[in-house]
């Protein structure tokens, strides 16, 4: 099936995200500074949007999460959104492979006052994951998409019964439905879905999203006891 061009709607989606940001979401200096620092340092603009950050924040509070695992720190923007939802003694372990991302993220955590809740582990996630101490109440996967099947297997190992696993960027402008795609991110996402479909412990769905980050979606998986 040909995938229609979605860019003609982008200005509207961004304007509505601005509207949501200006009406429902409180201004947070440290979160805005984190994005500004990320831009200034030349990090890719792959951070989640503010409405998506608020969504993750609400999810963390809804499941009463105390321990979170994040795969893919980038500049730490999503990390801060989730850390702000944790109780004082809560912890978010976040994995990053890129040195300049890690440097920017560390400064952003300090400025946001969440450094005491964040443990950043530097290195290739597939190499650092085996040594991490679980369990976690929530796992957020937002790194290189071709490795999503492996990241999900690790998430299943570390998630507590009744925990939630979120995966970013699983719709990819609709290209996820292209079964003949040679795009590594699409292939990784489709393998992830096949793996989940075959996993009886998981109840999952995808919420499609539009907004300042284009047309994409979150996978949300609940893991049985
Ligand atoms: C890309 C990665 C992301 O995590 C995202 O949210 C958007 C884009 C990317 O690698 O292109
Ligand atoms: Mg992402």
Image: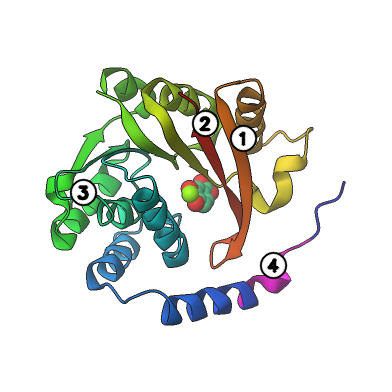
Q: Residue 57: x, y in percent?
A: 36, 56
**Marks 4/2: CA distance?**
26 Å
- Above or below 48: residue 178: above
Q: Which residues are magenta?
A: 5-11
Tell me the CA gap for discs 1 and 3.
29 Å
Classify mark 1: helix, strand or loop: helix
Q: Along the line of sight, which residue is nearer the eye, 80 or 40?
A: 80
* Count of all numbered marks drawn on residues in the image: 4
Residue topped by disc 4: 7
Which labelled disc corresponds to residue 103? 3
Residue farthest to the right, as pictured: 1
How packed mark 4 is, by other alpha carbons closer than 10 Å (few <14, some 14-19, many 20 or more), is few
Tell me: residue 196, above or below residue 206: above
**Is residue 9 magenta-colored?**
yes
Q: Who comes first in sequence, dot 4 or dot 2?
A: 4
Q: CA distance from mark 3 to mark 4?
A: 33 Å
Q: Nearer the viewer, mark 1 or mark 3?
A: 1
* Badge 3 element: helix
Label at residue 189: 1
For label 2, the SS is helix
| Mark 1 closeness class: few <14, some 14–19, many ≥20 residues within 10 Å | many
- Could you say which disc has been placed on residue 148 in the image? 2
Q: Quadrant of the C terminus?
A: top left
Lower sequence index among marks 1 and 4? 4
Q: Secondary structure at mark 4?
A: helix
Of callouts 2 and 1, which one flags the residue occurring earlier in the amino acid sequence? Answer: 2
Our reading of the magenta stretch's main secondary structure is: helix
How packed is label 3: few (under 14 Cα within 10 Å), some, or many (20 or more)?
some
- In the rendered view, does 130 fall on the left or right side of 148? left
- Residue at 32 percent of width and 18 percent of height: 130
């Amino acid at each position: 099936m040909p995938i229609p061009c979605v860019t003609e709607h982008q200005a509207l989606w961004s304007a509505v995200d601005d509207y949501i940001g200006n009406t429902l979401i409180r201004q947070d200096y440290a979160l805005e500074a984190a994005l500004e620092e990320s831009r200034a340092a030349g990090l890719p603009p792959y951070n989640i949007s503010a409405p998506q950050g608020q969504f993750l924040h609400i999810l963390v509070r809804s499941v009463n999460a105390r321990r979170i695992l994040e795969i893919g720190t980038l500049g730490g923007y999503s990390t801060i959104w989730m850390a702000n939802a944790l109780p004082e003694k809560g912890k978010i372990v976040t994995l990053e492979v890129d040195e300049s991302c890690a440097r920017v993220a560390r400064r952003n955590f300090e400025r946001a006052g969440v450094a005491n809740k964040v443990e950043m582990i530097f290195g290739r996630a597939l190499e650092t994951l085996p040594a991490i101490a679980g369990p976690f109440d929530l796992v957020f996967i937002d790194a290189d998409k071709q490795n999503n099947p492996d990241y999900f297997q690790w998430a299943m190992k570390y998630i507590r019964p009744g925990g939630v696993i979120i995966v970013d960027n699983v719709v990819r402008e609709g290209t996820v439905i292209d079964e003949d795609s040679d795009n590594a991110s699409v292939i990784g996402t489709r393998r992830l879905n096949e793996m989940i479909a075959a996993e009886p412990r998981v109840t999952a769905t995808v919420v499609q999203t539009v907004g300042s980050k284009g047309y994409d979606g979150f996978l949300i998986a609940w893991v049985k006891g």
